[in-house]
Image: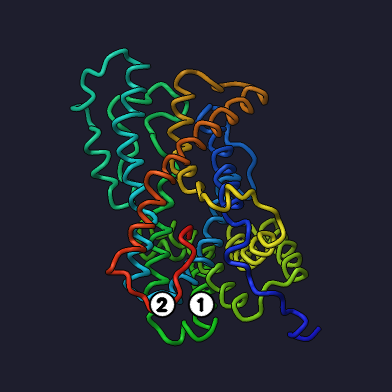
Amino acid sequence: MTLAALRGRPFPYRDNSLNLFRLVLAGLVLIAHSFYTTGNGVGPQLHGENIGGWAVAGFFVISGFLITRSRLRSTAGDYLLHRIVRIFPAFLVCLIVTAVVFAPVAILIQYGTLRGYLSTPVTPLQFVWSNITLFMNQYGIGRSLSAVPYPSVWNGSLWTLYYEFLCYVLVWLLGALAWFRRNAVLAAIAFVLATAAHALESQVARLGLDVSFLLFLKLAPFFLGGALVYFLIDRWGVNRWVGIGSLLVAAGLAVGIPGWGGQIAAPFIAYGLLWLSTVAPQPTWISRNDVSYGFYIYAWPVQQLLALVGFGVGAGALGLLAYDVVAIVITFFLAWLSWVLIERRAMARVRRSPHSRSPLPQLDPRT
């Protein structure tokens, strides 16, 4: 088969199902976490990673693809500003809502009084301030959530955002190099190095680096795999047979190689998902409203409140299914509010700003 046979049609950046895919991945994270938050074990796993972990991998490969395009089509300043505005406002509002709405409600349910709420460590202000940089230093607030199966953790999903932003910064730095902009070689080298470092995690750990760096090495290959695929798709387009083959290869690597099979499969996961997004239909409402980020950041606190009132806790399969359905409905509503009131407005404002003067074509405001 010649290389020409691998060519496909250009990727339809404004006519794909990536919003739907990201929402489905966020839903899978919620379902995975429901086992923990209700005390029903750890749920289905592959090589010690539950379906939520694999869904996060899907997030990272898609993000790597889209964010690399953003970097190459924006000035350095515009790129960084847009990335900050896309992730921080909704994150900060989520922290505040957790501290001033979710936590007080939980304390009232559990104790019937707010006495000591503002002064018992970790105080609401400490919770917000200590986590304001995206790195999660504190997960609990005062005495709240002491009686749930997964106690004293208000949001077990937010930790990944710090590493996603580190990947944004990595691509921001790589994008300053002409070599990175011209071809896929540097992206391929970065992907191979990150994957090798993760595969050799036990040796890397001997260097004295803390667990946060090891977590970065775990997630960065997925992001860089998506970045690598951007260069390939930008040049060759999306081919149906390559897409199908990529999904099969990704499944084989993930299943067949414990520990780092998912990471080495990242480019194949990325290509397969991107191809699927060109053929799978997406509701018009979802195409215009990217609620996946809000869904991701609000799912866990919603699940914890439901668990606090005993819903789904220790339940069988049907009880867990009912818990998931209720959590999905409530979380979707909060995600829609986050999109309409915070995310969409923040992005629209920064793109209208006179300080954003990139001579390059502007991207879809959903990315």
What amino acid is labelled 1 in the image? Ala
User: Which residue is disc 2 drawn over?
Assistant: 174
Residue drawn at x 48%, y 57% is 366
| Rendered image: mark on residue 314 | none
Taking depth in this image into account, of 346 and 64 the one nearest to the observer is 346
Badge 1: few (under 14), some or many (20 or more) residues near its Cα, within 10 Å? many
The quadrant the N terminus occupies is bottom right
Q: Are marks 2 and 1 in contact (CB under 8 Å)?
A: yes
Taking depth in this image into account, of 44 and 177 the one nearest to the observer is 177
Disc 2 or 1, which lies upstream in sequence? 2
User: Which residue is disc 1 drawn over?
Assistant: 187
Q: Is residue 54 in sight in this rendering?
A: no
Taking depth in this image into account, of 241 and 247 the one nearest to the observer is 241
Drawn side of residue 240 relative to residue 313, left or right? right
Badge 2: few (under 14), some or many (20 or more) residues near its Cα, within 10 Å? some
Label 2 sits on a secondary structure element that is helix
Drawn side of residue 243 relative to residue 70, left or right? right
What amino acid is labelled 2 in the image? Leu
Residue drawn at x 55%, y 32% is 329
Taking depth in this image into account, of 200 and 341 the one nearest to the observer is 341
Q: Position of residue 282 (x, y in %)?
A: 65, 52
